[in-house]
Amino acid sequence: MVASTSPEPASPRQAFTFYAANGQIYVSNVKQKLIALGPLTEEGQGYGYVLDGNQQTGQGLPSPEAALRHLADNVRFLYLDGQFTALADVRDTVNLEGAARIDVMLDELPREEGMQDARA
């Protein structure tokens, strides 16, 4: 008799690619939908951004890549999920050639929240 193994549970993480181009921050998901999140500006102290949907900000960042990393480190999956539902796909109207970009995996549910739910 052959022993069966249970498949590992699906990872609660989703892939996103963040871009900085044309004075904007964009993000795409695994379905290749591209949405605009808000402006990226070059200031005297570096780069900054303000997200249109929730007014999240980052300031004084040394490069567009650093701004994208700051955003990716501080944005929540549920916020992005809502933005992908609400906003139009702009991939046919935006040129991302030469754009700064980072690829990230975001947890669908932050570990702390999952642990709280499991204890409740």
Image: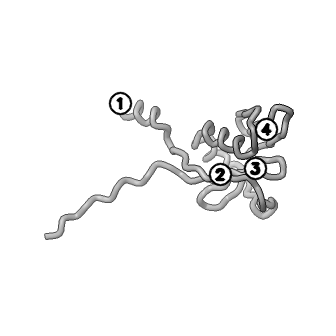
Q: CA distance from mark 2 to mark 1?
A: 35 Å
Mark 1 element type: helix
- Classify 10 Å Cα crowding around label 1: few (below 14), some (14-19), many (20 and above): few
Q: CA distance from mark 4 to mark 3?
A: 11 Å
Direction from residue 4 to residue 27 in the image, left or right: right
Quarter of the rendering containing residue 47: top right
Of badges 2 and 1, the one in the foreground is 2
How is the structure coloured here? one colour
The answer to which of 74 and 64 lies nearer the viewer is: 64
Q: Position of residue 79 (x, y in %)?
A: 62, 41
Residue ID at (67%, 40%): 71
Quarter of the rendering containing residue 95: bottom right
Q: Which mark is residue 47?
A: 4
Q: Which mark is residue 20?
A: 3
The residue tagged 1 is 119
Q: CA distance from mark 3 to mark 1?
A: 40 Å
